[in-house]
Image (cartoon, rainbow, N blue to C red):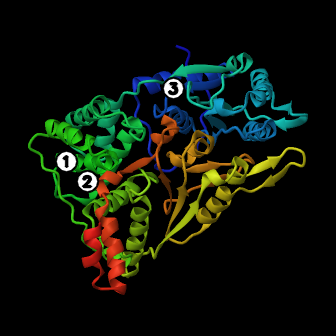
């Protein structure tokens, strides 16, 4: 074996989380370090949720190198890429370019020459070299890595001269059972080998037996988020045994996105895997009272389905910072998030010990704007940057120091044209990367909320990054609408229902 020998930098990274080491990550580490030794880049490839970006970040952390993750999009031009490469070369940091094959093929041909000049200078051992007609410093520790989802919509094939500069590594099937066992152990559970096997089996059977829905994802991202959510519940509910806590977490995180036909199937799988284990019933006393009061204030009916969906949205938002409410028109999507927003605001304002005061929403219709108007764009002729609506809203909300919750609401269809540029915001990086090189980090009090009709054109990379709350108009029915309408009529004419109900 040829081990990668280098001077390891000493950095203060804090006590942050680390990846679970599996045979796949070991093989990826060996491939990437060999690529660095040969003065080449690394290129992990594979479907969404297999740990490509996280493996690069963890390797950089282990070697003491700062890793900058950039979410690539069609709007990137050769000048923007050149600025990023110039910065990486002069600082010695690593650049991990996510979804690299989304960049236009015309830009990739120029990018190939930019990367070649850096790698050639590294191989020659230069301390200074000419890049884009300017002589700049070169720090030996810099590295360039790209990750790709082959076969997804909006992806291009890399040119051969660019492929030859990167050492490829295939990341297809992560060892989910081993990862589950280590995460459960880290969260403080006992008997983790048995529990991890049950969780892994549940998700495997869910993929095989439940219907194929566009908003379903039972991959590694969903699995890890369930286990971390279970760890938080374990620290809150110390009196319950481990199996009951895990069962509660799996139901909280999965039942919200299931259709009415799939719910009994899922419950059957859970009962087979956890025989004789009862799901703990949590008391949402103050929250439920606030929800019911808000429904009455808004002139709506206290339908159990809506109250349940509001609580499910609350729990899903506690576990994922990106949540999608999926459902047909008239299924109550807007009602659910508005009721939760007002209920939380009223509850926090009535509690003197609570640091938060309210929930603010920032609605955006992404399909009413072009990509340049949404994210911002460069004028290649004048080199002038025009800010976008989303970039301006995120910069404002993320820079505020108040503890109030801020929901950035995307009310409109989700498609690959605009949503793919938010992949780095929706995953664990929580950073919006703009074409001008600006990086906007999203703090914990800011979250994303999507209100969509369906996800028929969304890629698996998008679906796997979000928590889902599914709403069906069949579950709600027509009766609540009629009752709310009649209650408004009664305010004007108390005897109207005796005349109207027979007609209805």
Sort mark 1 into few (<14), some (14-19) or many (20+) by Cα contacts within 10 Å. Answer: some
- Residue 314 pos. (x, y %): 36, 60
Q: Residue at x 32, y 57 (%)?
A: 312
Q: Which residue is mark 2?
A: 234
Query: Label 3 belongs to which residue?
Result: 46
- Binning the other alpha carbons within 10 Å of mark 2 as few (below 14), some (14 to 19) or many (20 upward) gives many
Q: Residue at x 69, y 33 (%)?
A: 103
Q: Residue at x 38, y 45 (%)?
A: 225
Q: Residue furthest left?
A: 276
Residue carrying label 1: 242
- Residue 116 visible here: yes
Residue 131 x %, y %: 85, 33
Query: For residue 344, which numbered disc appears in the image?
Result: none
Q: Do the CB atoms of the residues marked 1 and 2 lie less than 8 Å apart?
A: yes
Using the image as rendered, state which of residue 17 and residue 259 is in the foreground: 259
Q: Secondary structure at mark 2?
A: helix
State how many labels appear.
3
SS at mark 1 in the image: helix
Q: Nearer the viewer, mark 3 or mark 1?
A: 3
């Amino acid at each position: 074996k040829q081990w990668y020998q280098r001077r390891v930098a000493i950095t203060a990274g804090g006590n942050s989380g680390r990846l679970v080491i599996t045979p796949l990550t070991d093989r990826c580490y060996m491939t990437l370090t060999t690529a660095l030794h040969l003065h080449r880049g690394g290129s992990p490839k594979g479907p969404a949720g297999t740990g490509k970006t996280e493996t690069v970040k963890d390797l950089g952390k282990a070697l003491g190198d700062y890793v900058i993750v950039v979410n690539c999009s069609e709007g990137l031009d050769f000048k923007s890429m050149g600025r990023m490469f110039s910065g990486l070369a002069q600082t010695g940091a690593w650049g991990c370019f996510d979804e690299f094959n989304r960049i236009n093929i015309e830009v990739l041909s120029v990018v190939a020459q930019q990367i070649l000049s850096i790698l050639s200078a590294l191989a020659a051992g230069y301390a200074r070299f000419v890049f884009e007609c300017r002589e700049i410093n070169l720090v030996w520790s810099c590295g360039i890595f790209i990750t790709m989802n082959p076969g997804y919509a909006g992806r291009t094939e890399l040119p051969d001269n660019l492929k030859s500069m990167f050492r490829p590594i295939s990341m297809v099937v992560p060892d989910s059972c081993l990862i589950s066992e280590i995460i459960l152990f880290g969260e403080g559970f006992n008997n983790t080998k048995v529990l991890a096997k049950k969780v892994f089996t549940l998700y495997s059977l869910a993929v095989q037996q439940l219907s194929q829905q566009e908003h379903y994802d039972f991959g590694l991202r969903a699995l890890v988020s369930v286990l971390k959510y279970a760890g938080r519940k374990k620290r809150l509910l110390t009196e319950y045994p481990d199996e009951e806590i895990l069962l509660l977490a799996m139901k909280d995180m999965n039942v919200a996105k299931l259709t009415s036909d799939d719910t009994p199937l899922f419950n059957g799988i859970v009962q087979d895997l956890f025989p004789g284990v009862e799901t703990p019933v949590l008391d949402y006393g103050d929250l439920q009272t606030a929800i019911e009061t808000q429904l009455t204030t808004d002139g709506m009916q206290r339908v159990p389905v809506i109250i349940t969906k509001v609580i499910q949205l609350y729990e899903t938002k506690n576990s994922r910072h990106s949540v999608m409410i999926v459902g047909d028109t008239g299924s109550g999507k807007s009602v659910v998030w508005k009721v939760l927003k007002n209920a939380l605001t009223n509850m926090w304002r009535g509690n003197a010990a609570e640091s938060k005061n309210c929930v603010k929403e920032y609605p955006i219709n992404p399909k009413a704007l072009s990509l340049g108007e949404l994210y911002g764009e460069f004028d290649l002729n004048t080199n002038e940057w025009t800010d976008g609506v989303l970039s301006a809203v995120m910069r404002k909300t993320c820079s505020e120091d108040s503890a109030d919750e801020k929901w950035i609401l995307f009310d409109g269809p989700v498609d690959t044209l605009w949503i793919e540029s938010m992949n780095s915001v929706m995953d664990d990086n929580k950073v919006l990367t703009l074409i001008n090189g600006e990086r906007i980090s999203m703090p914990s009090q800011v979250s994303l909320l999507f209100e969509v009709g369906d996800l028929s054109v969304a890629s698996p990379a998008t679906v796997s990054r979000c928590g889902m709350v599914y709403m069906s108009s069949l579950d709600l029915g027509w009766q609540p609408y009629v009752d709310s309408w009649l209650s408004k009529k009664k305010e004007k004419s108390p005897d109207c229902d005796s005349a109207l109900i027979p007609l209805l």
